[in-house]
Amino acid sequence: MIHSGRHFLQIPGPTNVPDRVLRAMHRAVMDHRGPEFAKLGAEVLENLQPIFKTAGSVVIYPSSGTGAWEAAIVNTLSHGDRVLMFETGHFSQLWRQLAERFGIHVDYVPGNWRRGAPAAEVAARLASDDRHAIKAVMVVHNETSTGVTTSIAEIRNAIDDAGHPALLMVDTISSLGSIDYRHDEWQVDVTVAGSQKGLMLPPGLSFNAISEKALASNKTAKLPRSYWDWQEMLGPNRNGFFPYTPATTLLYGLKEALAMLQEEGLGNVFHRHNRHAEATRAAVRAWGLEIVCEDPREYSSSLTAVFMPEGHDADRLRRIILENFDMSLGAGLSKLAGKVFRIGHLGSFNDLMLAGTLSGVEMGLGLAGVPYNAGGVTVALQSLAPAK
Ligand SMILES: Cc1ncc(COP(=O)(O)O)c(C=O)c1O
């Protein structure tokens, strides 16, 4: 089918890249050892700090988010170390797998893929670890496969209440720049992030925000590392440079994206995401469909995962929507495949884009013969602009 107009990219990342960012990247590649690059490097490294809400170091890797996951592990841990992780969904599963490949023993607390990491369980596990064998607590802030957000403040309090010295490592790949996040205040030791979601960039950059405590662990951590080594990176970063060829073009884009977030104000960015998430959930409820996230306190503001009615295939619905309306929705991942579709409402996004997105879903439900109640879009519009 030939489509006109713009494709709707409503997966929960990569997200729509704003024209301003695209234009900023539309430039000749510069010498990454020259003075102009040093200025760009220093500027983006500094301007990233308020996004993570940290006064500490942030490093930028030319990689997808998985690289920053690996960097967090190899820079702080040693073969045979124990860590505590929680089965929140597909991405907690993958991070666990990565850790195990490095010989880390993961205490993996089972979950039903509808809840976040329970702070009470963190408290209990750490309280019973009186020999401090657990070296790190590793949590996915926003589980992109389920649309569930864990309260990192509560996890922090649980660690403090137990008086336990474990590092706290948090994956913010689908929350940074979309959902409130505070690296320093919550005393997170390593924050993992990626470029392609709330930061409104193409895929290709990943980040570690690093605490002083994590830097201290780095000195004794024995896992082999080379490309991901923080020390290799932090030295040249002091002058705005990188130890190897940086993703120059993406850094032009990053500079622009950070300026856009700063102009809008992070508080306003989070408010915008909250409104869109709220309106989306209102539509889902009006359609008579079920939201995957069980606990309203853990609703994600960057995406909403929705169960299909029994006997109806989410991938068929997504295909019908793609063919008819040129809109991509997120697939259900691993054990949720075919059962769930995910609506991304993060990044560069506004009310009318959400109205279009929800209209595509509602029309798709009709075309696919899925039982639903009409009128979800109307309810969402009322949520966005309540009649005076
Ligand atoms: C929460 C989360 N963690 C990790 C990843 C992996 O990142 P990447 O695919 O960029 O390697 C993703 C990707 O969507 C994610 O959503």
Image: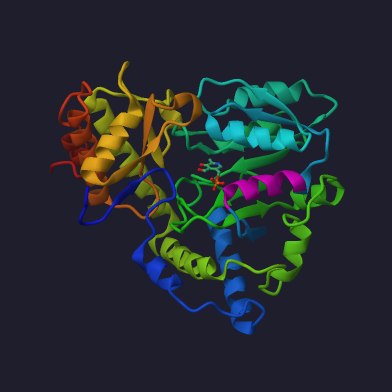
Q: Compared to 341, does 326 lie above or below? A: below
Q: How is the image coloured?
A: rainbow
- Image quadrant assignment for residue 102: top right
Q: Is residue 18 left or right of residue 356?
A: right
| The one of 267 and 176 positioned closer to us in this rendering | 176
Residue 114 visible (yes or no)? no
Residue at image position (67%, 79%) is 33
Give the left or right position of residue 349, taking residue 204 as reference.
left
Quarter that holds the C terminus = top left
Outermost residue toward the front in this view: 1
The residue furthest top is 310
Residue 285 against residue 2 in the figure, above or below:
above
User: In the picture shown, does residue 85 fall above or below 268?
Assistant: above
Q: Where in the figure is residue 369, as x and y percent of width and height? A: 20, 24
Whether residue 311 is in magenta: the answer is: no
Q: Quadrant of ligand 1?
A: top right
Instruction: Residue 121: give x, y in percent of width and height.
Output: 64, 22
Q: Quadrant of residue 119?
A: top right
Residue 71 rendering spot, x and y as whole percentages: 70, 49
In the displayed structure, does residue 301 sit left or right of residue 238? Answer: left
Q: Is residue 213 above or below residue 264?
A: above
- The dominant secondary structure in magenta is helix
Is 368 placed left or right of 192 in the picture? left
Report the magenta residues as a range: 64-74
**Along the line of sight, the residue nearer the viewer: 192 or 126:** 192
Residue drawn at point x = 18 percent, y = 31 percent: 367
Task: Give the camera-side residue of 53 and 363.
Answer: 363
Percent x, y of residue 88 = 55, 28
Residue shown at 56%/79% (left/top)?
30
State the residue at coordinates (21%, 21%).
371
Q: Is residue 68 magenta?
A: yes
Between 175 and 96, the one lying in front of the other is: 96
